[in-house]
Image: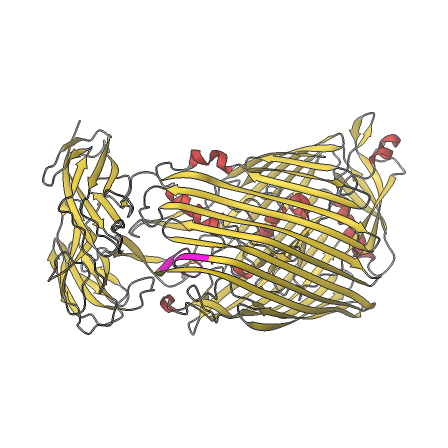
Amino acid sequence: MRQSVLVVVVCLVATACDEGASRAAELQRVRPLGAQVRVASSQERSSPVAGEAVQVEWLVRGPEGRSAVHFVLGVCEAVGEGAALPNYTGPVFAHAQGQHTTPRLDFTVPADTRADELLVAGAFCESSPASFDEQHMLGACEDGALPESVSLHITLGESNLNPDLSRAELMLDAVAWPDGECPALLTDGATHVLGGRLPGAREQVGDSPERLEELLVAHVANRAGMARLLSIVDSSATEAVFEVPWTSAPSQGAGPVHFTFVVRDQRGGIAWLDRCATWAQP
Amino acid sequence: MVLLSIEVDEAGAVQAVQVVQRPPGAHADAFALSARQAALGFVFEPATRDGQAVPARIGYRYVFEPEAPEPAAPSTSAPPPDTAQEEGAEAQGEAPPLEFGAVATARAASRSASEQQVRADTVKQFAGTRGDALRAVELMPGVGRAQDGAGEVLVRGASPADTQIMLEGSPVLLLYHVGGFTSFFNSQLLQRLDFVPGNFSARYGRAIGGVVDVRVRDPRRDTLHGTVDVNLIDAFVVAEGPVSDRGAVAVAARRSYVDFFFDEVADADSFNVVAAPVYWDYQAVATLEVGGNDQLRLLGYGSRDSLHLLVDEPQDGEPRLRGDMDAVTEFHRVELRWKHRYNRHTRHEITAGAGWLGMNLQLGELVSQEIRGPRIYARGEWQTSPAPWVTLYAGVDHYTLSAEVKYAGSHWVQDSAVQQGQRILVDEWVTIHRPAAYVEAAVRPTDRTTLLPGVRVDYSSDAGTVTVDPRLTVRHGLGTRTTLKAAAGWFHQPPELGSHIERLGNPDIDSAHALHTSAGVEHEVDGLSLGIEGYHKQLWDLPVDTPNNEAPHLVNEGRGRIYGVETTARYRDARYFGYLSYTLSRSERRVRQGQYRLSDFDQPHILTFAASAKLGVGWELSTTFRLVSGTPRTPVQAGLYNAATGQYLAVVGEENSERRPLYHRLDLRLLKRWAVGRGAISAYVDVQNVYNARNADSVDYSFDYRQSERVGGLPIIPSVGLRGEL
C-alpha cells in the first residue's frame, strides 16, 4: 500500500494546473482516433464469440480530415492481461496491410480459443509502407518517419453493442449542427461551445433499467482551441449530453475546420461523428 | 566537572568558550570537549549595565553525571540573571567572572557503529530547514536526495520504505507534512536526532535500511517559556513551564496556511477546490519526578494532512482521474514512559503507547484506498553494569496494528504511481502482531576497546516467521582522539502492510533480509571531528512483482547490493560551525535470475556542506549546499496507441538505463535576534535554492510520448518569519 499518498495528489494537482488548450485534441498529424469492432453477423455488436467473423475498422484523421495511411495489422489470442503493455503472446492468426483512409482487419475468431481476449496490433505510416516488430510492439516506416504503433484488446463473450449515434444531435453555440453543413466562424478569438445530445447511445448495464453505460466522448479538431480532449456522460445522467468550449485563435488562417467526436462506452463499443466549419477572417 | 569561561555578547549569544579546568581521569579531553561544544550552543539572557545590554564573561561549572532518570539536560536557557544584573555583569576583560553551572547527562558511547547524534538546537539553525530540526536528516552523510515534495528519506541507496522513522523508539508513519517543507513534530520540543544509516543496535529492528529516531526533550522547569513563530507557510506556538516542584508541562501546536491562497493558484477550470491542502500537528509532554529514582513522562502528539479536490472533467491523460480527489493522512498517539533507577548501576525505561492511524486516498475512479485503525506500541529496556568493564542491555518491544483495509483499483506497479491489470476490491480487517526481544552487551576488555555483541529475535504474525538477527560492533581507541570502528549484523524487514492480503499481494510473502558490514575511523581535534566509513549491504528476499503481476502478485525474489564510502568533517568554535560530507556509493538490484541493474535510489555522489556564523549583535548567517547525482530512470522509447481507451501507452526502454540530471542547491538563512526583557524576538529570512537552480528531474511527456520536457524542481523559495520567545 502506498503510504506517501499525498504526494500522488500533489502531482496530480501540478498536472491539472497545466493551462491552455488540449494538445491531445488538436490533429497536427494523421493519427488513429479509435477502432470499431463489428461482428459480421450482427454489425452493431462489438463483442464477438469464438467462431464468429469480425471486422475491425480504424478511425484515422489528420489535419486535412480523412487521410489515407499505410497500415499493417495482425491479431492474436491475448494472455497475460496484467501486463503493463499489450504484447503478442500467441501466434498471429490473421494479417492485413495496405493503404486506405479506414484501415481494416477482417478475421474469424478461432473456434477453439480459450482466450478471454484478442489483441490486434500494428502500425500506420503516413507516406511509406509500414512494418511492425511483434516482439517489441514497435512499428516502423520504410521512409524512416515515426510510425503510429497501435493496439486494441477485444473482449470475447461479453454482450456489448457499439453506441448507436443515429439519433445524435450535435450543436454549435446551441444551434443544430448537422452533418455536411459547415457554418462560417470568424477567427476572432471568440469561444464557441460545441455540444451534443446522444439519445439512445447508451445500453442498460445489469438488471436495473436505471443503470446505463457511462460514455466517454473524445473531441478533436484539426485546429487548436479545444479546452480538453474528453467529456463524460455519467451512468447516472438521465440525458446523454456533453459540452466543450473551443476558442479560435486569431492567428489561424481561413479555411475548413474538421471536427471528430468519438464516443466510447468503455466496454469495447465505439462510434464517431464528423462535423465541419469554415474559418473566415473578421 | 569542567570549568568554563564563557564570553556572551550583548544579544546573549555565546562568542567564545575556554576550558579553564578539566576533570581528572582518562576521559578528561572528551568531557572538556563535550562541555565546550554544549556551551557554544547556549543562549543567555544578556547582562545589563545601567539598563543597557552589555557583553559579559562568566564562569560556568559543567557537571557530568551518568545517564539517569532525572531530567538533567544541559540548560540552554539563561543562568540566574538577577545576580548578574545586581553585580553589573562583569564587562569583558574584567575579573573575576561570575560563576554559574549546570548538570549534564553523559550518555554512554553509541551502541551503533554508524550513529550520528545531532542536537536539535544545532541543526535547526541550518539554512533551508526553516528552523525545522528534522529537515536536517536530509543533510546527514549518506542521505540521498528525494524528489522535491516527496518528503522521503533515502538512506545509503535504500528504498525510503526500508528506513524506519521513529519517535522515542516508536515507529511513526511519516517524517514530513505534505510537500516536505515541515516535519510533523515541533523542533522546539526536540532534544536530538539519532540517525543510523546502517548497522544499528539490536535495540532497533524491522528495517533493512536505516533508522531515524527522534528524541523529545523534557519540558523546562525553571520558569514559564513560550514561543510564537509566524512565517509564510505556517505558524506555531509553544508554551512550557513548571507545574510544581516535581513536574513540568510543554504544549505546542502548528497549522499551515496553504488553504488561504490555494484558490488563487489552482486552475479553476480543471477542478473545484473543496478543501485545500492543510496540515496541522500538536504535541504535549508532561514530566513528573517521583522520589529520587523515578520519572514519569506522558507524551501525546498527532498530525493531519489533508487535501480534497473535485475534478469536474476527465483529464486528457487519464479519464478515470475525475470526481473526488481526496488524500488524508492522520495519526494520534499517547504514550507513557517510566524511567526507574534501581541503584547506581541498574535502571530501566519502559514505554507504552496507543494511537490511531487513518489514511485515505481517493483518486477519482482510478483508485480508492483506506486504512484506519488503532496501533499499540510498547518498549522496555533494562540496563545494568555488574562490573566496570561491562554493561548489559535487555529489551522487549511490541507493535500491534489492527486496521480496516479497503482498496478498489488495479495493482500498483511496484515503486511507481502506475496501475495495471484488472480492478480488485478489498475490504478486510487486518491485525498484525510484531513482538521482539533483544539482548546486547557493551564489553570493555581494555580501556580502549569496546565490543558490542547483540542479538534480536522478532516475530511477525503477517509473515508468520521468527527471525534471529545477530549483530556485533567493535570500537578501538588509538590514543584519546582516534577511534577505529567496525560492525556487522543481520537485519530483516517484515512485509509492508497489505502485502499479505491475497488480492493485493501474497499471503505467503516473507520478510526481506540484509547483511550490513562497515568499518571506519573517527578522529577528533579540538573543535574538529573527522570521519571516514566504508560500508556494504547485501539484501535478499526483497519483495518484487510477479511477471505481468499475475497471482500471487508479490514474491521474495529480489536481491540487492549497496556499497560505498562516507567521509565527514565537522568544525565548531565560538562563532563558526561547519560541516562537510561526501558519499560515494552504488546501489543495485536484481529480480529473479536477471542481471544486477542500478536501483531506483542509486545516487553515486552526495556532497553536503553546511555552515553557520555568529556575526555579533544578534546576527546569524548560515548556508547549506548540496550536490547530488540524479537517480536512474527508465527512458520511454515510443507511444503505443490503445484504441480501446483512446490513450497512448509508454513503450519503455532498458530499465534504469538513464540518469536524471545532477541536483544542486544553495540555501541561505539570515537571522537577527533582539533581547527584549526576559525574552527575545527573532526575525529571519530563509531562502531555499538561492540561485534558482532548475533541478528539473521529472520528465513530462506529451499525450503521445513524441515530445518530452524536463519539469519539476522547486524554484527559489524565500521564507520570512518572526519568532518571539519568552
Q: How many marks?
A: 0
Q: Is residue B383 magenta?
A: no
Q: Position of residue B282 (x, y in %)?
A: 62, 44
Question: Which span of residues is magenta-colored?
Answer: B406-420
Residue B119 visible in the displayed image: no
Residue A240 visible in the displayed image: yes
The furthest residue to the right: B96
> A124 or A144: which is nearer to us?
A124
Q: Residue at x 19, y 57 (%)?
A: A124
Q: Position of residue A158 (x, y in %)?
A: 23, 62
Is residue B435 positioned above or below A20 on the image? below
The quadrant in which residue A168 appears is: top left
> B399 or B673: which is nearer to us?
B399
Q: How is the image coloured?
A: secondary structure
Q: Position of residue B641 (x, y in %)?
A: 25, 56
Is residue B204 positioned above or below B253 on the image? below
Q: Position of residue A92 (x, y in %)?
A: 20, 70
**Lateral position of residue B348 relative to residue B309, left or right:** right
**Lateral position of residue B633 relative to residue A223, left or right:** right
> B175 or B86: which is nearer to us?
B175
> B520 or B187: which is nearer to us?
B187
Q: Is residue B408 magenta?
A: yes
